[in-house]
Amino acid sequence: MIIAERKPLEEIRNMLAGYKRILVVGCGTCVTICWAGGEKEVGILSSQLRLASSKDGNELSVMEAVVERQCEKEMVLEELGDKVQEVEAILSMGCGAGVQTMAELFEEKPIFPALNTTFIGMPEKEGLWLEMCGACGDCFLDRTGGICPVVRCAKGLLNGPCGGTRKGGKCEIDPEKDCAWVLIYRRLEKQGRLALMRKYYEPKNYRVVKRPGKIEALEA
Amino acid sequence: MGGAKMARPFRETLKTKDFIVTAEAGPGKGSNTEKLVEHVELLKDRVDGLNVTDNQSAVMRYPSLGTCLLIKEHGGEPILQITCRDRNRLAIQADLLFAYSRGINNVLCLTGDAIDTGDHKEAKPVFDLDSVQLIHLVHTLNSGKDMVGNELDGGVDFCIGASATPSADPIEPQLLKFQKKLDAGMDFIQTQAVYDMDELKRFMENFHKMDNIDGVKILAGIVPIWGAKMARYMNENVPGIYVPQYLIDEIDQAPKGTKAAKGIEMAGRLIRQIKEEKICDGVHIMAIGREERVPAILEAAGI
Amino acid sequence: MTRENKKIIAFCCAESAYRAADRAGRLRIRYPDNVRVIRIPCAGRVSVLHILKAFEKGAAGVLVMGCQEGACRHLTGNIRAKERVKYAKDLLKEVGINGQRVKMVNFSPDMAQKFAREIEEMAEKIKEE
């Protein structure tokens, strides 16, 4: 799923400076699961905004809403409907795709992002998410025991560890993080597939996903 | 080129010389090349090749390519270090063509230290290629074609080097990558700093068991120690370097004012042992800002 | 809002703090009357949003009062409450409200004096600012 983090309140307030009626819109999918932009976080941010502006003596009306999936136009329209007409600006607590979906639907309104979309990952334990996929469009996991070197190696190396590996197989840039290639080595060793690590892999094809990405599929 | 005499091509040295010595010239930050030229003048006739670091430790500096030109102009034999961190495959190929056109014929292919270790931490890391892919790329250029198969109008013929890390822990994944470099075809290997000769011997034993090692010369990395603090700092902060405690104690016990002489003696001793016991084919001295002490180290080593 | 009617909201766990408050009343221990006690089944019931809402509605201080650590009837409700209070402090600081205006306190049911003391302390704190 997509992992995001909320921006600092000050940055959000600077974006909203001058607007008196706003709508804070959360998303019920990925960012709900990673505690960044679900119903609860919409409530917290809205409450903070009200408290901060009343402390400054400014009037700010904050409406709240949550769309089940902010990156789906139909769902956004169904949930928000007329609410958008009542406000001057929209603060999205969705990922970058959610923000842009709403920006397209409500072209006449300024849309501001309250989150920084950070990566595609998985929950490791409660409150901790780890990056797992870089959406590179050319999956390499068959060769690496299901551990992605594109994002889990700090340098995205495809042919093995760099010389910077720290004692005990930790990463050059962070002694708290494992070297992805040491993990790959151990996994492949366990599976008796170390021959995969001896193979040479060509430079990655960065044209697989032509930016901006677009995929058309047939309905089954 | 000021009529400077031509240095012996490094490839020839690799084939004919018993004990090969290279050293490192680290460019500074700024366009003032005075000190750099001083180091080059001092070292060019005493070593077989002079490596130039490429934004070493991800710290922005005077370029590797420009320094190699300076070395060439002063009659030395430059070894161009290229990392994958700051350039994509187009830029790397273009730089290699330029280098070769100006008589720079040796290249050391490196991954490059992570952006986070340097002084421009917010920069975008490139790593379009990795070091193994870079070695393959140089071979492709050597064959007269670019990476995508276009003919080159005027080819190149680089002598190709790479690095290895004998002190890595765990060593197995490193050896597998090292094997890929050998499979690609290497002329020479310059290792990360080694201090423990048993470790170097173990690394060489591993090397001799590997495939595609014919004609590959191994130069052991020598980083002189100038104090116990520096050694401890490297142990804690420089991955792949391990200074044993007895060497830290030795430099620590040297009286104040004699540390430099002690560091020179210790580095000289390591080199002498490598040479006398024929542990590997030579050494690569990285004096990191103290290049002026390299001649004394060589004297201490009896070279 | 004037100084006199600055409100304190005390979320009190029914198992401990609420009983301590009750006892304080029966023992006629005096404490400031600008406190509004809210009975909750467990301190773990209080969310960050409850705390923020209290401030939004005009509270000047919030106390989350749960059982002693290790004595929670729901095992970790009081630990969760402690973490949430910590989180709420950061959120309040971001808004420019002193983080000391929200506090987690642990009780056993017999701590009537402590209940009164905590209310007094918070009342003093909100008076100062």
Image (cartoon, coloured by chain):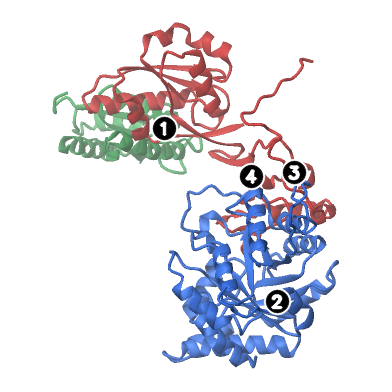
In the rendered image, residue B135, in percent from the top left (x then y), is placed at 73, 59
Tell me the CA gap for discs 4 and 3: 12 Å
* Element type at mark 1: helix
In the rendered image, residue B214, in percent from the top left (x then y), is placed at 85, 72
* Element type at mark 2: strand
Q: Which residue is mark 2?
A: B219
B136 relative to A20 in the view: left or right: right
- Judged by depth in the image, the label closer to the viewer, 2 or 1, is 2
* Element type at mark 3: loop
Q: Are marks 4 and 3 on the same chain?
A: yes
Query: What amino acid is at disc 2?
Result: Leu
Task: Note whether residue C112 is visible.
Answer: yes
Which residue is pictured at 73% across the width and 54% down the height? B133
Tell me the CA gap for discs 2 and 3: 36 Å
Query: What amino acid is at disc 1?
Result: Ala
Which residue is pictured at 48% across the width and 49% down the height? B122
Q: Which residue is mark 4?
A: A151
- Judged by depth in the image, the label closer to the viewer, 4 or 3, is 4
Nearer the observer, B6 or B178: B6
Query: What amino acid is at disc 3?
Result: Gly
Chain letter for the red colouring in the rendering: A
Q: Which residue is mark 3?
A: A146
Q: Which numbered disc covers residue C43?
A: 1
Q: Which numbered disc covers residue A158?
A: none
A55 relative to B69 in the view: left or right: left
Tell me the CA gap for discs 2 and 1: 66 Å
Q: Are marks 1 and 4 on the same chain?
A: no
Please determine whether, in this image, residue A136 is positioned above or below residue B166.
above
In the rendered image, residue A169, in percent from the top left (x then y), is placed at 65, 60
Q: Are marks 4 and 2 on the same chain?
A: no
